[in-house]
Image (cartoon, rainbow, N blue to C red):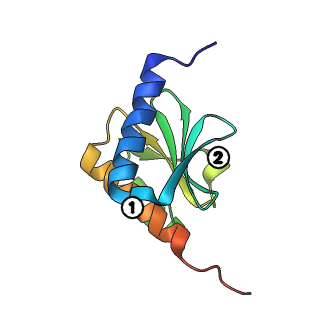
Amino acid sequence: MSEPIAARTDFSRVYTLAQAALSDEIMVKEGIAGPCIAYHDQIIAELRETGLLWLKCPADQKVLLLDISPDIYFETDELVGQDGVFIRMTTITDQELALRLSDALASSRRPLSRE
């Protein structure tokens, strides 16, 4: 069964913005729930269903986004305490989405702490 046209359109939008912002450093993968944008095998965005994107997001930034724009960003119980946020694709602008994708890549580039 093929995926709905809206889902392909959502992913095409994410991929186009990611490619423009992140150039050749990204790749497309198939995730558990749907297509993903990855950086060095680290998933930074995944289309979970039509109109719903999971995006890697540092916890401190996530709190701010959830407070400022609850119409765009939200989390479910599965994301509490995790570095990720859900995005409603119908409410986010291309400019905002490109910025969030750039932030997700920047957080993926940070070296892991050695604890």
Q: Which mark is residue 20?
A: none
Q: Residue furthest right?
A: 115
Residue beneath disc 1: 102
Residue in view at x 36 percent, y 43 percent: 16
- Badge 1: residue crowd in 10 Å (few <14, some 14–19, many ≥20): some
User: Which quarter of the rendered picture does the C terminus lie within?
Assistant: bottom right
Left or right of residue 97: residue 11:
right
Could you say which is closer to the camera, residue 92 or residue 67? Answer: 92
Residue 83 in the image: state x and y as whole percent.
58, 61
Against 106, residue 112 (above or below) is: below
Q: Residue furthest front?
A: 24
User: Which quarter of the rendered picture does the N terminus lie within?
Assistant: top right
Q: Secondary structure at mark 2?
A: helix
Q: Amino acid at mark 1?
A: Ser
The reply to whether residue 56 is in sight is no
Residue in view at x 45 percent, y 35 percent: 11
Q: How many marks?
A: 2
Q: Amino acid at mark 2?
A: Asp
**Which of the two labelled residues, at mark 1 and mark 2, occupies the earlier sequence position?**
2
Q: Secondary structure at mark 1?
A: helix
Residue 39 is drawn in which quadrant? bottom right
Residue 113 is drawn in which quadrant? bottom right
Mark 1 touches mark 2? (CB < 8 Å) = no
The reply to whether residue 38 is in sight is yes
Residue in view at x 45 percent, y 69 percent: 106
Q: Nearer the viewer, mark 1 or mark 2?
A: 1
- Badge 2: residue crowd in 10 Å (few <14, some 14–19, many ≥20): few
Left or right of residue 55: residue 14:
left
**Label 1 to label 2: alpha-carbon separation:** 25 Å
Residue beneath disc 2: 77
